[in-house]
Image: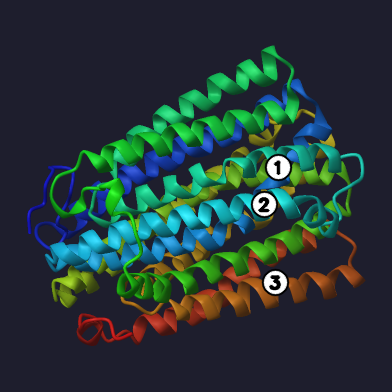
Amino acid sequence: MSRGTSRMVNMTEGSIWRHMVNFAVPVLLGNLFQQFYNTFDSIVVGRFAGKDALAAVASSGNLIFMMNAFFIGLTMGAGVIISRWFGGGDDERVEAAIHTDVAFGCVCGLLLTVVGMGFTPQILIWMRTPADVLPLSTLYFRIFFAGSLASVLYNTFTGIMRAIGDSRTPLIYLIVASVTNIVLDLLFVGAFSMGVAGAAVATVISQLLSAILCAIRLMKMEGACRLVPRRVRFDVHQLKLITNQGIPAGLQNSIIAIANVVVQSNINTFGNDVMAGQGAYAKVEGFVFLPITAFSMALTTFIGQNLGAGKYERAKKGARFGVISAMLLAEGIGVVIYLIAPHAIALFNDDPDVIAVGAKAAHTEAFFYCALAMAHAVSAIMRGIGKAKIPMYTMLGCWCLLRVAYITVMLRYFRNVVVIFSAYPLTWLCSCVIFLICYLRIDWERAARPLDY
C-alpha cells in the first residue's frame, strides 16, 4: 500500500512504546490546547460577564457532550475500521471507508444542528436550570449548535487522520483554532461586551476554521487516504461496518452524557453558587482527561492497525503499555489537582462559596482518577478488537443506572452536594472491576481474525 505522506504512521513495525508515545503526545498537546481555550471561555465570561453568565456557560458541558456524544462515537467506529484496513494494506477499502465516513459526518452534522437548536430550551427546563440562568443558557446553546456541522466534520476529519497514524496534523490545526478562539473571546466578550453570545460565536468560528483546515489537508494527501469531494458517498458495506462499531461507541458516549445531564439537573437544584463551583471544577477536571484521551486514541489506532496486520502479540503488548501509562499519568495529575484545587477554582470566580464547592469536588474525586483512566483505556482496547458492545453495556450499568440510582436515593436522606461528587469515584471503581475481568479474558489470536459482522 502506498502510504502517501510521511505523516502517516504504520504502527505494525518498530518500537511499540515509541509509536504509542509519538501518537499520544500530539493528541495530549492538542487536547491541552483545547482544554485551555475551553477554560479560557469560562474565565473570560466569569470575569467580564458575571456569575450568572459563568453558570450558564459552565453548565453547558454536559448538555453539549450529550448532543455531540453519539456522533463522536460514530467517528470512533469509523476510525476502528479505517485503521484495520490501513494496517492490512487494503487501499480500496481504506478509500471507501474514508469517503463513507465523511458522507455520514455531513448527515450527522446537519441532524445535530436541527435537533440541538430545536430542543435546547426544553432540555434545559428538564435539567431544572434556574429561571435567572435559563435565557443565557438557551442563547449560548442555540448559537453553539448552529455550528454543529463544522464540529462534527472536524471530529470526522481528525478521526480519519488518527486512524492512519497521523496525530500531529490535528494538533497543528487545533492550536490555530485555540488561538483564534482566545482572541475572539477577548474581542467579543471583553471588548464588545457580548456576554455568553460572544463566547458561543467565538467557539463556532474557531471550529469552522479547524474543520476547513482539516478538509484541505485531507484533499492534499496522496494515495488511498486522499479525500476527493466528488467521491463522498455511502458505500453500503463500509457504512455497515462503521455503524456496527460506531453505534455502540456512540450509545456508550450518550449513556454517559445522559447520566451526567441527570446529575447536572440535581446540581442545579443547589443554586447558582454550586452550579458555578462545580462547573469551574469540571473545567479543571478536564485536564485529567488529557492523558486518558491521548492514550485511549493511541490504543485504538495501534490495536486496530496491528490486528489488521495479524500481529496479535504486538497488539497485546501495546494494550498493556497504554493502560499502565494512562493510569499513572492520570493519577499524577490528580495529586496535583488535589493540592492546587482552591487556587485553580479561583481563576474562574473569586466568590468564596464558589471556590469552596469546586475545591470540595476536587478533594472528593482526585485520588480516583486512575480508575477513570483504566475504564477509558480498556474501553478503547475493546473497540480496537471489535468488541464495542462490552464498554457500552458496562457504562450503561455502572456510569448511568448505578450513578443515577445512587444519587437519587442518597439525596433523599443526605441533602449535601458531596453525595453527587462521591458518585463518580464509586461508579468508576465498579466499572473497573468489570473491565479488568474483560481485559484478562481477551483472546488476542482470535481478535486478529477478520471482523465478523
In the rendered structure, which disc, 2 or 1, sits on the residue that comes first in sequence? 2
User: Label 3, on which residue?
Assistant: 403
In the rendered structure, which disc, 1 or 3, sits on the residue that comes first in sequence? 1
CB atoms of marks 3 and 2 within 8 Å: no
**Residue 120, percent from left and from top:** 75, 51
Observer able to see residue 146: yes
Residue type beneath disc 1: Arg
For residue 311, which quarter of the picture? bottom left
CB atoms of marks 2 and 1 within 8 Å: yes
CB atoms of marks 1 and 3 within 8 Å: no
Residue pictured at 35% horizontal, 64% vertical? 234
Q: Residues within 10 Å of mark 1 (few under 14, many from 20)?
A: many
Element at label 3: helix
Q: Is residue 298 above or below residue 148?
A: below
- Is 54 on the left or on the right of 380, as rendered? right
Residue type beneath disc 2: Gly
**Residue 305, percent from left and from top:** 21, 65
Q: CA distance from mark 3 to mark 2?
A: 25 Å
User: Label 2, on which residue?
Assistant: 116
Residue type beneath disc 3: Arg
Q: CA distance from mark 1 to mark 3?
A: 29 Å
